Image (cartoon, rainbow, N blue to C red):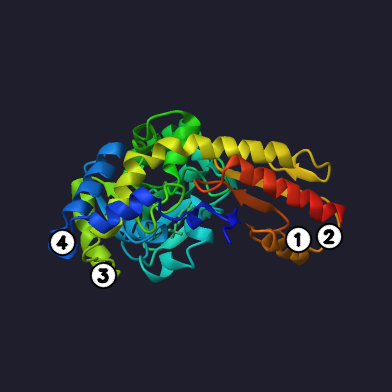
């Protein structure tokens, strides 16, 4: 049975074109720097984001944690939003790998107040103080919001005043660039390093990329080895990633439009409230009705639709390459059927 899978854009399978490219990829041992397909992908990624160099890593979490591990020394402090992926969804890895202290600040739907960041920066040496090693931002935010560049510009000015690097968790940077209608370089320029996922809406089966200047990436390469991320004939994976960057990133608007269509259709139910505007490929909503949540999920699953349980009563549906308009119509039909039975 082919499922309509609305749980995440991480569920995207590689396209036929990717599978073909993977089977034909020219490969070598990447730990010996001998995989031409990995090299091509890394060169392409650095170029697209306007940075000097890039490094292929197994996952988005790996890319973020490698960035922390490379920018910071043990005991350093990282300033970041309290609802960001690094804090909420990376299983405490920052304490395990980089050994840093996370200094979380209030996030207003993903937007960080530059003044609050400034107030948290350690401004002088004191025997009691950790050093502020990094500021970490996220765009698009995993709450579906696209952060305006004006906010990044203000944070960059503060970071420069105190000489603190910025890492951008850009797992969905191409969704953000699509929504803002800007070249991704315009987002990347505010950060010293950026990680992004090939394995989400861009359809690659595995992989993320970390970009930065050559010195940073050289250092990160050693740390990647420490983390067990020195891969061998990884060109098989990079071949799919190249298609992600050359082709798939240019079609994200379609996913955003489908998400808007899904939100419009859902909002026709008088008991459903859409939470905020749809900016990327995610729709968040509440169902204001008494019903059995488990039965709802099972009913949809029996009818070929996969959804995640709600998080604090908020459902998240995600559109992607394998979700077409007809799939949304079918989902709406079964939601209607469930609540009318
Ligand atoms: C998905 C995601 C990640 C991590 O990606 P994985 O490949 O699942 O480890 C990091 N940051 C954000 C904002 C994400 O949405």
Mark 1 or mark 2, which is nearer the start of the sequence?
2
- In the rendered image of this protein, does residue 55 appear above or below residue 188? below
- In the rendered image of this protein, does residue 20 appear above or below residue 62? above
Residues tagged 4 and 3 counted as in contact (Cβ below 8 A): no
Residue visible at 40% across and 57% down in the picture: 60
The residue tagged with tag 3: helix, strand or loop? Answer: helix
Q: CA distance from mark 4 to mark 1?
A: 48 Å
From the top left corner, tell me how far across and down residue 235 is, in percent. Answer: 23, 57
Mark 4 or mark 2, which is nearer the start of the sequence?
4
Q: Residues within 10 Å of mark 2 (few under 14, many from 20)?
A: few
In the visual, does 168 lie left or right of 268? left
Q: Which residue is mark 4?
A: 28
Residues tagged 2 and 1 counted as in contact (Cβ below 8 A): yes
From the top left corner, tell me how far across and down residue 207 is, in percent. Answer: 35, 57
Mark 3 or mark 2, which is nearer the start of the sequence?
3
From the top left corner, tell me how far across and down residue 218 is, in percent. Answer: 19, 55
Q: CA distance from mark 2 to mark 3?
A: 49 Å
């Amino acid at each position: 049975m082919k499922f309509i899978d609305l749980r995440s854009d991480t569920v995207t399978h590689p396209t036929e074109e990717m599978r073909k490219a993977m089977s034909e990829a020219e490969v070598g041992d990447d730990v010996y720097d001998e995989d031409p397909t990995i090299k091509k992908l890394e060169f392409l990624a650095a170029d697209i984001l306007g940075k000097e160099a890039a490094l292929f890593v197994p996952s988005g979490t790996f890319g973020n944690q490698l960035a922390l591990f490379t920018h910071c020394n043990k005991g350093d402090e990282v300033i970041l939003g309290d609802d960001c992926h690094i804090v909420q969804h990376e299983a405490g890895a920052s304490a395990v790998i980089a050994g840093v202290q996370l200094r979380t600040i209030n996030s207003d739907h993903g937007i960080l107040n530059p003044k609050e960041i400034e107030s948290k920066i350690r401004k002088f040496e004191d025997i009691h103080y950790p050093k502020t090693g990094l500021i970490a931002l996220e765009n698009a935010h995993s709450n579906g919001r696209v952060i305006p560049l004006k906010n990044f510009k203000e944070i960059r000015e503060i970071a420069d005043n105190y000489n603190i690097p910025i890492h951008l968790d850009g797992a969905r940077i191409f969704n953000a660039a699509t929504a803002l209608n800007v070249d991704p370089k315009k987002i990347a320029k505010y950060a010293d390093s950026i990680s992004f996922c090939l394995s989400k809406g861009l359809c690659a089966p595995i992989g993320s990329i970390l970009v930065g200047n050559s010195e940073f990436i050289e250092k990160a390469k050693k740390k990647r080895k420490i983390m067990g991320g020195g891969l061998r004939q990884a060109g098989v994976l990079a071949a799919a990633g190249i298609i992600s960057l050359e082709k798939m990133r240019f079609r994200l608007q379609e996913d955003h439009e489908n998400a808007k269509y899904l939100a419009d259709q859902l909002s026709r139910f008088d008991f459903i409230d859409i939470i905020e505007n749809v900016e990327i490929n995610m729709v968040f909503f509440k169902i204001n009705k008494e019903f059995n949540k488990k039965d709802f999920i099972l009913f949809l699953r029996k009818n070929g639709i996969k959804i995640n349980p709600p998080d604090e009563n908020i459902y998240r549906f995600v559109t992607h390459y394998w979700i077409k308009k007809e799939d949304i119509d079918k989902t709406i039909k079964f939601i209607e059927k469930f609540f009318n039975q």
